[in-house]
Image (cartoon, helix red, strand yellow):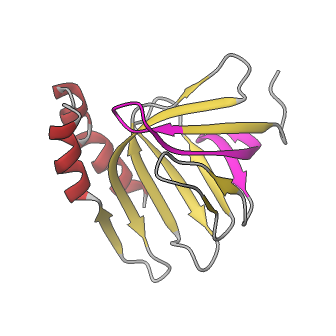
Amino acid sequence: MITESTSVLVDIRKYDGSLSARWTATRLGEDEHGVWLGTAQGVHVSSDTGGWTSRFAYVMLVPRGEWWTATFCVDPGPEMYCDVCTVPEWNADGTVLQTVDLDLDVVRSCGGEVHIEDEDEFAEHRVRYGYPASALTGNVCPMRSAVRCV
């Protein structure tokens, strides 16, 4: 049985397998929306392009069977940040979360304005990495679902 306060390794890759981001979060619990993870300000995040520390604390929702995750941030971060990705996968004991970042993000600022980020990155990567048709068409429904979510 997975308990609250368990450390979870969050491992996010790009479509070519390179490391987009990796950090350790705390499992806060699970409800009808999915699994909730917490990350404190100052947590180290690793990436193939370098590392950084989280600038603010946040809670991440990992829904079941969806092509996105949602991150709820404290000031000065955005109010909500939805990452369009492959359906998140958990290891058997629930301590490792893996997903592939599909570049597109839906962001709601603290003022309530909603916008889509990284459309240029998505256009570039779909050619560079050769996203399959399922990822291209799969992004349409997740994007609509993520926009409704924010």
Q: Which residues are magenta?
A: 12-39
Q: Residue 21 in the image: x percent, y percent? A: 53, 47
State the residue in front, 6 or 142. Answer: 6
Q: Quadrant of the N terminus?
A: top right
Q: Residue 34 in the image: x percent, y percent? A: 60, 38
Q: Quadrant of residue 108?
A: bottom left
Q: Residue furthest top?
A: 92
Q: Residue at x 39, y 38 (%)?
A: 14
Q: Residue at x 66, y 70 (%)?
A: 56
Q: Residue 19 in the image: x percent, y percent? A: 48, 40
Q: How many marks?
A: 0
Residue 16, relative to residue 114: is it above or below? Answer: above
Q: Residue 97 in the image: x percent, y percent? A: 60, 32
Residue 106, relative to residue 26: is it above or below? Answer: below
- Queried whether the magenta region covers residue 21, the answer comes back as yes
Q: Residue at x 43, y 36 (%)?
A: 18
Q: Residue at x 72, y 66 (%)?
A: 41
Q: Quadrant of residue 2?
A: top right
